[in-house]
Amino acid sequence: MTLSQPSPDLAVTPRFAPRFSLRSLLIVPFVLQTLGTVGLVGFLSFRNGQAAVQDMATQLREESSLRVQEHLEQYLGHPMAAVQSNAAAANLGQLSLEDTANTRAFLLQQTRIFPTLDGVYLGDETGRFLCICAASKGEAVEKIVTSVPERQVYSLTPQGERDELLEQHRYDPRQRPWYQKSGGRSQAVWSDVYTFTDGELGITAAASFDGGDWLGRGVAGVDLRLDQINRFLQQIEISPNSEIFIAEQSGELIGSSIESEEDADRFALEDVNERHRAIESENALVQATAMHLQDAFGELASIQGSQQSDFTHGSDRHFVQVLPYRNAQGLDWRIVVVVPEADFMGRIHDNTRTTLQLCLLALVGSTLFGLLLSQAMSRSIERTSRAAVAVAGGNFDQRLAGSYIREVELLARSFNRMGQRLSQSFAALEEANETLEQRVKDRTAELRKEHDRAEKLLLNILPRKIADQLKRDGNPIARSFDEATILFADIVGFTPLASQHSPTVLVEVLNRLFCEFDNLAEKHRLEKIKTIGDAYMVAAGLPEERDDHALAIADMAMDMLRVLEDFTHDLGQPLQIRIGINTGKVVAGVIGKKKFIYDLWGDSVNIASRMESSGEPGQIQVSQATYFLLREHGYALEQRGQVEVKGKGLMMTYWLRAKEPAPLVSAFA
């Protein structure tokens, strides 16, 4: 077999280029790569461990603060619901300080339904007072003031009857902070946090009531102990040394996860007139956290949203999250969660050391294996390396010389075939690219047509302004309009017709008629809202405001009557409609996320509907608000008189007659 001459491209190695053995080229990069990989793995392992700890701490802080927030909502929700219920019952006369027996039974039942309540009571403007308090042994007591300022305290039997008089002392509920804070307010409120006589923290929910001339005014109250907040916080497991505490804006503590009885007593001191702030806590971590928050944010009151930070206490880093807790009844507390980084980094350090040891072991083993493998490979690869360089030149027409070595010969033939096929493949690829570009252009044109069709369908459902806004952000859209005019029209006697004709005929007639109405709405630049069965709803002055909204709706209504006069159908009897119009403030928009519809809400919409339902066939009934807008613009209006409108009582309404100027004629003249 004769060997072919090698291509001139094979002999292009520079004369003075550095020479390296194949073994060194295989071993040195492999060792360097392994070293780099080991170092990078160790570094990333440590950094990823730190990042994982921070992420975990963040998640635990957020989850724990949210759990505390949910617990507070539930824990504080029961007394607030109870006091609001009591105030409502007093407003209705169901609870009364005149009928102390029934009121006592009701309040006693509440203390049994809500065991967290410390006391439930009523006080009125005359100084009368009735309180049912749950005793520590499960027995209830009654505290009652019938003549100011003497208060009697009775023990109660399990059946709620008075047992014996326990004590008497002076007491005027009108002088109490809960009465003065709630008196005259329109909604329930929470009192300031204070200490009970036994040293525990508590808070009062209070709501004023007004029972009229007979029962008079007063305040309903519910006392709530805050000791269960501590118990709940102690049950939240974050890490061995983490802490959770709740404080007021002033920094005074409400509760804490501190399990030590000595530290827990710091929140309910023997001196009931004094409470400690978090910055004065005997717990070092709570105190350090409070000092960090003071340095970072100043007062706790300045923290208005969820905040995360970290600080160093001792030699350890700690993660902190502050979550404000607010409600509509006046509470404004701060939930603070602090997590030490050291609780998580110990295992991370152990894992990092183990990873580095395994990587070093892998480095030594890989290096030894690479030495043996490179020695075995270099002898045969050196014989065929020159032929491989020719193919690496990038000339697909290049042909490699053959060899007596079977493996090298097979390699050369493979390279030659590969070059030939690559040339063919590139030619085919260019042709395929041209075809693909044309297909892309055709498909783009089809997609553009589909987009235009979808755009038209969307604009048939929603106003363009609303559709554009919905496509931009996808959020619910709602806007208030100070003045808009709404028209409701309903076909008279359509229900009997539905029983006499097939649905197909009825739908065809309705479609023809409502298409005429749609043309009128487009003519007068009105916004069609919807059709409900045989009812038609249209509005003016939204989503784009316009000054002539009432005039445009009036013209639309009169055109609708004219269209109906000329309308022909196959139902065998003429059609009549009632039309009602009203002007006022509405809210318009799109809500939900499926099957969008542009709709209106508000009392003005309900009045417009009532104008239609209380009208007469073939007539246009308008409200007084619309009448005032039309009377100065050449519309003939006739006073109908006062009409009973559901939910509104008697309302003055008018008939819209024509556009020509005409004097107002009273229907009752």
Image (spheres, rainbow, N blue to C red):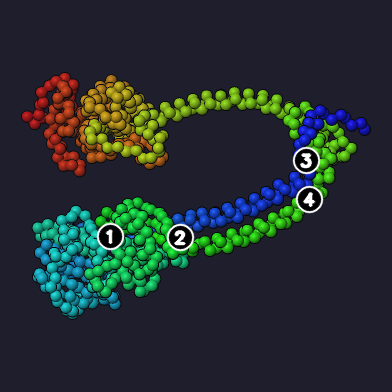
User: Mark 2 vs mark 1: which is more N-terminal?
Assistant: 1
Percent from the top left, x then y, of residue 93? Answer: 16, 60
Residue wearing tag 2: 317
What amino acid does circle 2 point to?
Arg
Residue at the spot x=32%, y=66% of the render? 280
| Residue sitting nearer the eye, 171 or 586 | 171
- Mark 4 lies on a secondary structure that is helix
Residue drawn 17% across and 28% down? 629
Please name the residue that numbered disc 1 is placed on. 250
Secondary structure beneath dot 2 equals: strand
Q: Nearer the viewer, mark 3 or mark 2?
A: 3
Which of the two labelled residues, at mark 3 and mark 2, occupies the earlier sequence position? Answer: 3
* Badge 2 vs badge 4, beta-carbon distance below 8 Å: no
Amino acid at dot 4: Leu
Q: Nearer the viewer, mark 2 or mark 4?
A: 2
Which label's residue is closer to the chain start, 4 or 3? 3
Judge by depth and name the residue closer to the eye, 445 or 309: 309
Closest to the camera, between mark 3 and mark 1, is 3
x and y percent of residue 227 in the render?
A: 32, 69
- Please state which of residues 115 and 411 is positioned toward the viewer in this rendering: 411
Give the residue pinned by disc 3.
19
Look at discs 4 and 3 and give the one toward the viewer: 3
Q: CA distance from mark 3 to mark 1?
A: 78 Å
Position of the N terminus by quadrant: top right
Give the left or right position of residue 345, taking residue 213 as reference: right
Seen at 77% across and 33% down, the residue is 14
Q: Is residue 310 visible?
A: yes
Disc 4 + disc 1, Cβ < 8 Å: no
Q: In the picture, residue 385 is in which quadrant?
A: top right
Q: Mark 4 = which residue? A: 373
Which structural element holds mark 3?
loop
